Image: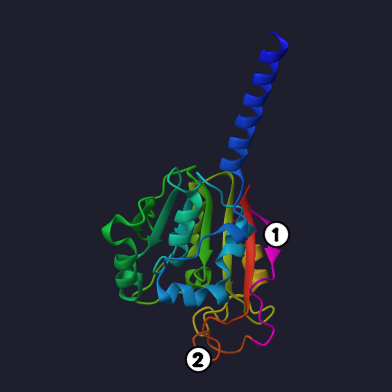
Amino acid sequence: MNTFQGKITAKLAALSAMTLLAFSAPLLAGSLDLSGRSDDDTQQDSGRKPAQIIEFVGVKKGDKVLDLLAGGGYYSELLSRVVGEKGEVTLQIPKAYLKYAEKSIKVRLANDRLKNVTYLLSEADNLKLSENTYDSAFLVLGFHDMFFKEDSWNFTADEVMPQVLKSLKSGGKLLVIDHDATENSGILDVKSLHRIDSAYVKADLEKRGFKLVKTSKILENNADDHSKLVFVPELRRKTDRFVMLFEKI
């Protein structure tokens, strides 16, 4: 190989490396386009800090992401922008969520506007998740609901989390965000206040095959005394929330 050919080969290799890096690099918070969304979504951004959260998880283009108990799909829409046309997002809810989220989901997915988002209506006994599929799973403000039952609700961690674990690729990440509860309270307040003790969450998930990788204080609110229902007007969307990132062992 002559000198000219060697230079061309080196340049092509460098360009290929740059292309691969651009494709595989995790999102940087400042680069997420938050425009063109509903007024309700936009109003939530300041309290939910989605760009920083998605960066915290390390989501990148081409990823497959599970949005578990996704509600109206707030995160699903943003994740669809991050993973791009070669990525996939699964927006999962059970039937019990329909009375709260169905209208929002219909509007969000109307006219196939989020082409890389799949809407999955499934129950705890069979989530219909393919194994070894997802690079990450988002569980935002829903984990506490897995520790109580009532007539219209039966979505328990014992049934759900083993399926989530299997659905993640080796080394796949699980994001858990939830309303923090009084220290050492465990699951005492999961139904009455919709809160769960962060220490309990860590211990529970580590028993289920996950390892805590890192935490963030980005959604902390020290003015929240943890004794009030999360839906009272002064706390709605302003609670003290823990942010934890786990990895499939």
- Residue 31: image quadrant is bottom right
Q: Is residue 207 visible?
A: no
Mark 1 secondary-structure assignment: strand
Mark 2 secondary-structure assignment: loop
**Which mark is first along the chain, 2 or 1?**
1
Name the residue carrying label 2.
233
Q: Total of numbered circles in the picture?
A: 2
- Which residue is at 35% across, 56% downward? 120
In the rendered structure, find residue 214 and report the number of the disc placed on it.
1
Bounds of the magenta span? 206-224
- Which residue is at 48% across, 72% downward? 145
Neighbor class of circle 1 (other Cα within 10 Å; few <14, some 14-19, many 20+) is few
Q: Position of residue 246 (x, y in %)?
A: 63, 56
Q: Residue furthest top?
A: 1
- Which residue is at 31% across, 67% downward? 107
Residue 11 against residue 80 in the figure, above or below: above
Residue 68 against residue 147 in the figure, above or below: above
Q: Is residue 134 left or right of residue 128?
A: right
Q: Residue furthest front?
A: 4
Q: Position of residue 56 (x, y in %)?
A: 64, 59
Q: CA distance from mark 1 to mark 2?
A: 31 Å
Q: Residue furthest right?
A: 3
Instruction: Please tell me whether residue 86 belongs to the stretch shown in magenta.
Output: no
- Along the line of sight, which residue is nearer the eye, 65 or 165? 65
Q: Position of residue 169 (x, y in %)?
A: 54, 43
Q: Is residue 22 visible?
A: yes
Q: Of the residues tagged 1 and 2, which is closer to the observer?
A: 2
Q: Disc 2 residue type?
A: Pro
- Residue 25: image quadrant is top right
- Which residue is at 56% across, 48% downward? 60
Q: Disc 1 residue type?
A: Lys
Residue 52 against residue 117 in the figure, above or below: below
